[in-house]
Image (cartoon, rainbow, N blue to C red):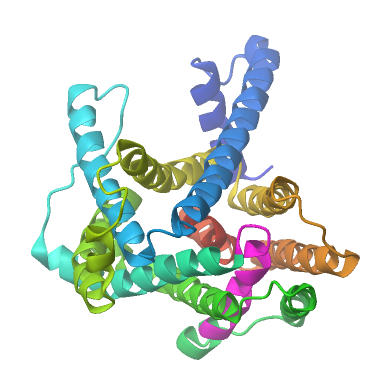
Amino acid sequence: MNRTQLKRSSILRMALAGSDASDPDDSGETFLLRAVRIAAVVVLYWFVSITMVFLNSYLLDNQDLDAPLFVTFFQCAVTVGLCWIMQLLSRMCPRLIDFPVVRFDVKTSREVLPLSVVFIGMITFNNLCLKYVGVAFYTVGRSLSTVFNVLLSYLILRQTTSLRALMCCGIILGGFWLGVDQEGTTGSLSWSGVFFGVLASACVSLNAIYTKKVMPAVDGNIWKLSYYNNINACVLFLPLILVFGELGRVATFSRLTDLSFWSMMTLGGVFGFAIGYVTGLQIKYTSPLTHNVSGTAKACAQTVIAVVYNSSSKSLLWWTSNMMVLGGSSAYTWVKSLEMQRSPRKDPQDLAKEKLLPGEKDSLGV
């Protein structure tokens, strides 16, 4: 076990046991507590992530309100509001809640703006993909993030990719095209949904690249980044809502004064905020690699739940396409992990960020 692993193990022991990690008498209890904590965190991540996808699908599938930009704008506004609330609670209960001080700064907002433009594209195209393809095909429809990550890393960063990693991308591409073919065979294919899924995948990869570039502007704090990102997004969404005529649709919406509708909208924003927290929590108590594997397994469970919930009947080839996408994504994560272990030693924090980029994109999107 290397020094980094020992350090992380020590931190985990202290966090879970609440005592000195070097006490051998507490090792059995510490292991049990750690196992329970990890299991609870993974279950929480699955619950929040899957619930968020189904909740967004419900909101976007509303036939009476065709306003996906407004729905996304409202969720961004909820995130900003929650950042303010968390900051206030952190001041009142600093021992229980740790949240950075977030004061709006025009200069910082301007530095984050390029990322915010990509962020808007990512969450908008992601929601449009979900709106047109549904939850069952969502995993395949949004499966090209890893492929775009490799492509854009070469075009923008001039980073080459190994043959084994490229083969994994080939498996993902094969699964994507097979899934599209099978959806077309059943007559349920939405080319609009596929198109938006491809655009969302490209934006997710760009988002990962730009996130690394703007992190210094927010002192490397992910919550500050989320705060500025969502404030910028709220401002940028307003003209888009006007241009696409969604303001009129919202004004004439029959359930505009319905408390249950706004409760669901707010709940969607809360889960959108929560996914960032539980993602960080899962990485903290496991590892970036384990988080990616958990995300892949979650996507598989999410697909099965959607098929069962909708009482759908899918062919063997349709399921094969899903397994190819999930298998290729897992294999890519594993290959990149092995390659990073063989590369010259880097700072543990930087290494964790690099491991996170290829697979994390599927979670924060949402």
Residues 1 and 187: in front is: 187
Instruction: Judge whether 94 appears above or below 268 on screen.
Output: above
Residue 165 x, y percent position in the rendering: 72, 76
- Left or right: residue 111 versus residue 182 is left
Residue at the left extreme?
106
Residue at 25% from the left image edge and 59% from the top image edge = 252
Instruction: Judge whether 35 appears above or below 20 on screen.
Output: below
Residue at 77% from the left image edge and 55% from the top image edge = 312
Residues 284 and 310: in front is: 310
Question: Magenta-highlighted stretch: main secondary structure?
Answer: helix
- Left or right: residue 280 versus residue 77 is right
Write down the quadrant of residue 39 in the picture.
Answer: top right
Residue 180 x, y percent position in the rendering: 72, 77
Residue 186 x, y percent position in the rendering: 78, 72
Residues 353 and 360: in front is: 360
Residues 108 and 355: in front is: 108
Residues drawn in magenta: 134-152
Is residue 150 rendered magenta in the image?
A: yes
Residue at 30% from the left image edge and 37% from the top image edge = 259
- Left or right: residue 171 versus residue 204 is right
